[in-house]
Amino acid sequence: MSSGQPRAPRTLIVLADGIQAAFAAGAVAELGRAGARWSEVWGAGLGAQVAVLAALGEAEEAARRWQRQGELGCPLLQSRVAALRERLAEPTGVLLVPDPYTLDGWLDGGVLDEHLAPERADLPGRLAAAGVGAGVALADLEEGTVGWFAVGGRQAADAGDLLTAAATFAGGWGARRLPAVGNRLVLGGVGSLPHGAPERAETPGCDLVCGFPVPAAARAGSAPSLLETVQRRDELHGAAIVASWRRGARLVAPTAAAYRAWAGRDNAELGVEWPLPTERNGELAGLLVEFGAAAARAALESR
């Protein structure tokens, strides 16, 4: 619990793809309740939205939104195919088949835009008013580079585009072509993490929140499906990157032992039951917020 004394501003890094952001939102909200305040935030995947909301003093709002996603059945992560089937009311004699050569992502980019609309509105101005710096991880698919991109000090539209692009990931929402980076094609997600850590990431004054296990958890019996293997590879990449530069940071991430204790089942297997980023499961979204808060409390108590 907070002692009521002012806390020195910290650095916050939030890395999470898709529904992993529900865990991250619960964790960051709990850190905020304990008195953490941040003067600089960095994010990858939908974790970037959680980080930005925390920078604006709205960490609780991120958790509330994911709880709401749970109540609604997580429409944010509904596939394009499922949405089209609903619109067509399952007409007899019609088969919807995704075209892998033209489909840029499994999830609906328009739904993502709507989800991020509140944060896109005058993001640079709001960050400046709060006195907080923010950046996101992106892969430039045309230049062949990955790096951190500052979102402050830009035009509002450019900053909003960077935040939205950061949420995209392979097999999820498709890559975006951004004027902010020379109209080149960029992709976000934890698979776009650069090897170089953000400033102050390796210090005790950093809160590092990951929606995936660090180090990576074993996952026996993984299916060879395209979406699962792509997402699993990105999760492994993210875990390896974070492990290489976390050092003194306060890490909040799911672990096998913590998951068993929280689930209250000796047979709870993190590597098997942890969600894929595109899994549409309303009940799971709400539970992940609670698990993230529990993991953050454990991290606070261990210091």
Image (cartoon, rainbow, N blue to C red):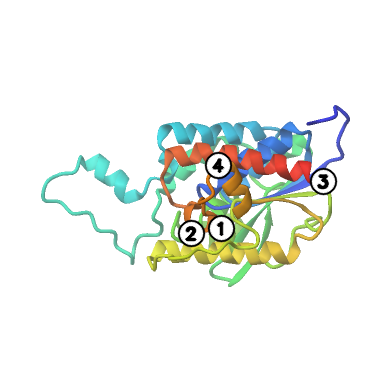
User: What residue would you read off at disc 3?
Assistant: 303
Q: In front: mark 1 or mark 3?
A: 3
Task: Give the amino acid at mark 1.
Answer: Gly
In the shown orientation, is residue 181 left or right of residue 133?
A: left
| Residue lying at the far left of the rendered structure | 93
Task: Give the amino acid at mark 3.
Answer: Arg
| Residue lying at the far front of the rendered structure | 266
In space, the residues marked 2 and 1 are separated at their CA atoms by 8 Å
Q: In front: mark 2 or mark 4?
A: 4
Q: Look at the picture and state if 189 lies above or below 21.
A: below
Of helix, strand and loop, which one carries label 2? loop
In space, the residues marked 1 and 3 are separated at their CA atoms by 32 Å
Who comes first in sequence, dot 3 or dot 2?
2
Picture quarter with the N terminus = top right
In the shown orientation, is residue 93 left or right of residue 227?
A: left
User: What residue would you read off at disc 4?
Assistant: 264
**Label 3 crowd bin: few (<14), some (14–19), many (20+), radius 10 Å:** few
Q: In front: mark 4 or mark 3?
A: 4
Position of residue 292 measured from the top left corner of the image (x, y, whole percent): 62, 42
